[in-house]
Amino acid sequence: MARNKIALIGAGQIGGTLALLAGMKALGDIVLFDVAEGVPEGKALDLAELTPVEGFDAAYAGASSYDAIAGADVVIVTAGVARKPGMSRDDLLAINLKVMEQVGAGIRKYAPDAFVICITNPLDAMVWALQRSSGLPPEKVVGMAGVLDSARLRYFLAEEFDVSVEDVTAFVMGGHGDTMVPLVRYSTVGGIPVPDLIRMGWTSEERIAAIVQRTRDGGAEIVNLLKTGSAFYAPAASAIAMAESYLRDKKRVLPVATLLNGEYGLKDIYVGVPAVIGARGVERIVEVELDRSERAMFDRSVAAVEGLVEACLKIAPGLGK
Ligand code: A3D
């Protein structure tokens, strides 16, 4: 069986980590694309030289021309500018919107059958712009944020309870930003919901509230420590989990930014919700019941995403058509 082809648009911090993880998980051959001269070629060669040591067969190539992504099965987009300290995700909007238009045109021409995962921030607006500019079906264009935000929540909960991260589930809905909606009620340890664990005396409401806030600030916490960029290991691993679910038709239930078409009473907006990811892309959107305060948080988050999309439309009105 021929190997799958994975195209990584953007060969920066996340792009390089994606290339390493995709190879080590035997997902396919990998093309790194970037506009920075020599960088995609240099990273591809370095990674190719790692394959004999790690003992896996994957071809790595670096490119700065879009024809190199021809026929890709999966495209993961990190092209653009990352956040610097003091810079909000929204500040990135104008710069990265232009990049999404270029990337969308490249995908439309060379990889129209791919499953496309956007990571570039501000995420919910950029994945919307990428779907519009590529013209690919919405079920084949998704944004990665929820898997990362949920992983952060899972990690903090595992630390709090001193249990394995494997036994902690959690999910975070809404837009990827300060208004994200971590759902404590649907977060569990060994199947036991967190509110029950509070009642059992394992933790307190206050400690869980602090963990929720730390999850919301998870990106900024790392930006403030690194000073020269944003998180890249966990974001890359999160997108690889989505790519793997698609390529291997695993049908995992993952929180992803997907285009809603009536679900949650919303239409034509990309926002984070749980979804089944399989060989057809987004195969089903899971509509969970939200209580009044969760719904209010979700609505606030949706309003923030709508604001970003409006800002995009002011810059690039053509995307609205
Ligand atoms: P970085 O290491 O700067 O890599 C970005 C790469 O994109 C650089 O190598 C650039 O040369 C390249 N690039 C710029 N313009 C273009 C273009 N027009 N075409 C092709 N390549 C281009 O950043 P990073 O890898 O750390 O982060 C990438 C993006 O992911 C940023 O927008 C981050 O804000 C975002 N990010 C999102 C999350 C989410 O959870 C959604 C988490 C972490 C980072």
Image (cartoon, grey):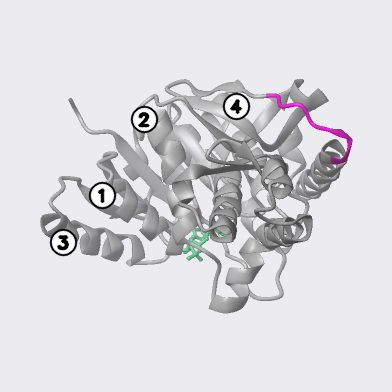
Depth check: give the residue in front, 112 or 214: 214
Q: Is residue 94 left or right of residue 265?
A: left
Q: Residue at x 72, y 56 (%)?
A: 208
> What SS does tag 2 mark?
helix
In this rendering, is residue 297 above or below 230? Answer: above
Who comes first in sequence, dot 4 or dot 3? 3
Q: Which residues are magenta?
A: 287-293
CA gap, disc 1 to disc 2?
A: 15 Å
Who comes first in sequence, dot 3 or dot 1? 1
Residue matched to label 4 = 138
Q: Residue at x 49, y 36 (%)?
A: 116
Q: Is residue 74 left or right of residue 276?
A: left
Amino acid identity at mark 4 = Pro
Residue matched to label 3 = 49
Q: Are marks 1 and 2 in contact (CB under 8 Å)?
A: no
Q: Are marks 3 and 1 in contact (CB under 8 Å)?
A: no
Q: Main secondary structure of the magenta part?
A: loop
